[in-house]
Amino acid sequence: MWFAYAVGAAFFFGLRGILYQWTSQRTINRDLMFIGVYISSAILALIINLFVNQIWSNEVWFGVLMGVFSFLANTFLYKGYAVGRASVIAFFSGLTPVIVVLLAALLWAEKLSPVQLVGFCIIILSLLIIRYKRDLQEGTYQG
């Protein structure tokens, strides 16, 4: 069953990406589009919930909270790309693992295993290399 969910996620994320790309070539209100995406998803979830008569447990409310955070993250990302340099916005949007590790350590006193720590360091190093690649190329050293 997990494979069907994985294929479904890949298909629908791909379809969403195609629609985002298609709409980027049109003159539409992007704010309205983003809010429409999340409101229509919430309405669809409510309708399905009414149909199957599912109980709203704590997990559902955490899912709602994750949806709100996802909406806010997409909104800030879109607005950041609209007004700022894409390289800086992409760098900061790639710092998600840092936030997750820091909050997990602070809130739940979690610790990384050695393998996780190596993976985390690879992620951070790759972000730094990508961010400063242009500055580190031969003949362009600055400061």
Image: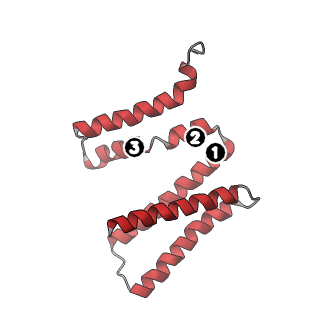
**Residue type, numbered disc 3:** Pro
Q: State the SS at label 2.
A: helix
Q: Position of residue 6 (x, y in %)?
A: 39, 62
- Mark 3 element type: helix
Asked if residue 65 can be seen in this view, the reply is no
> In front here: 90 or 139?
139
Badges 3 and 2: C-beta atoms under 8 Å apart? no
Q: Residues within 10 Å of mark 1 (few under 14, many from 20)?
A: some
Quadrant of residue 21 within the rendered picture? bottom right
Q: Which residue is tagged 3?
A: 97
- Report how far apart the C-alphas of labels 2 and 1 lie in the structure: 6 Å
Q: Are marks 2 and 1 in contact (CB under 8 Å)?
A: yes
Q: Is residue 110 above or below residue 36?
A: above
Give the residue pinned by disc 2.
89
Q: Residues within 10 Å of mark 2 (few under 14, many from 20)?
A: some
Q: Name the side, left or right, on which 139 lies relative to 111.
A: right
Instruction: Please tell me whether residue 34 is drawn above or below residue 96 in the rendered image.
Output: below
Q: Mark 3 near mark 1, Cβ–Cβ under 8 Å?
A: no
Q: Quadrant of the C terminus?
A: top right
Could you tell me which residue is drawn at 37 percent across and 33 percent down?
122
Q: Earlier in the sequence, mark 3 or mark 2?
A: 2
- Asked whether the viewer can see residue 113, the reply is yes
Position of 99 compared to 18: left or right? left
Residue at 48% from the left image edge and 79% from the top image edge: 46
- Disc 3 from disc 1: Cα separation: 20 Å
Q: Earlier in the sequence, mark 2 or mark 1?
A: 1
Query: Which residue, given by chain and number where applicable, does mark 1 sit on?
Result: 81
Q: CA distance from mark 3 to mark 2?
A: 15 Å
Left/right placement of residue 69 relative to residue 119 reads: right
Q: Quadrant of residue 61?
A: bottom left
Which quarter of the image is occupied by the N terminus?
Answer: bottom left
